[in-house]
Image: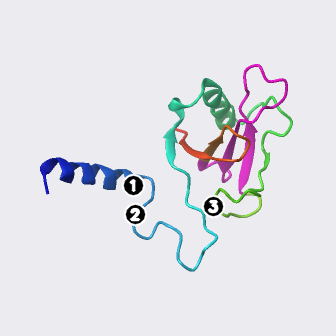
Amino acid sequence: MSGFLRSLLLVCASALASVGCGPGNGPSAADSTAKPAPALHAAADLPAEVLATLALIRSGGPFPYRKDGSVFRNRERLLPQRARDYYREYTVPTPGARDRGARRIVTGGRPPEIYYYTADHYRSFRRIEARP
């Protein structure tokens, strides 16, 4: 194997391991309903409104929308299954929208330990690295 291919394989393996795709981290064969966690993205790569909403979440508000902080039930089952009150949703403002728009951040845990972003009202999610 050439040095380039070996290096490429090591980089790919390292990237997969860093997002929890190593042995023992995926869904078990016995749990056919388990969904893989969405890929991890840096929050800085997302719209500026995402960063502002993350700052509000970290500070505990105040939030501009009444439903911010309410339980997200994961009816779409695109996120890993957790207890009913594990996920919370927050609106990410959409410039020019007259309503809440489609963009949301969904957090898991209290205090939040994991963050997801959806730009299409829960049809897809991106896991985001929300560093303080």
In which quadrant will I find the C terminus?
top right
Task: Pinpoint residue 76: horizontal percent, then vertical percent.
Answer: 73, 56
What segment carries the magenta color?
86-114
Badge count: 3
Q: Residues within 10 Å of mark 3 (few under 14, many from 20)?
A: some
Mark nearer the N terminus (2 vs 1):
1
- Disc ID at residue 99: none
Amino acid type, mark 2: Gly
Secondary element at image label 3: loop
Q: Residue at x 60, y 74 (%)?
A: 32
In which quadrant will I find the N terminus?
bottom left
Looking at the image, is 16 positioned above or below residue 101? below
Residue that numbered label 3 is attached to:
80
Residue that numbered label 2 is attached to:
22
Q: Nearer the viewer, residue 5 or 40?
A: 5
Amino acid type, mark 1: Leu
Secondary element at image label 1: helix
Amino acid type, mark 3: Pro
CB-based contact (under 8 Å), mark 3 and mark 1: no
- Disc ID at residue 16: 1
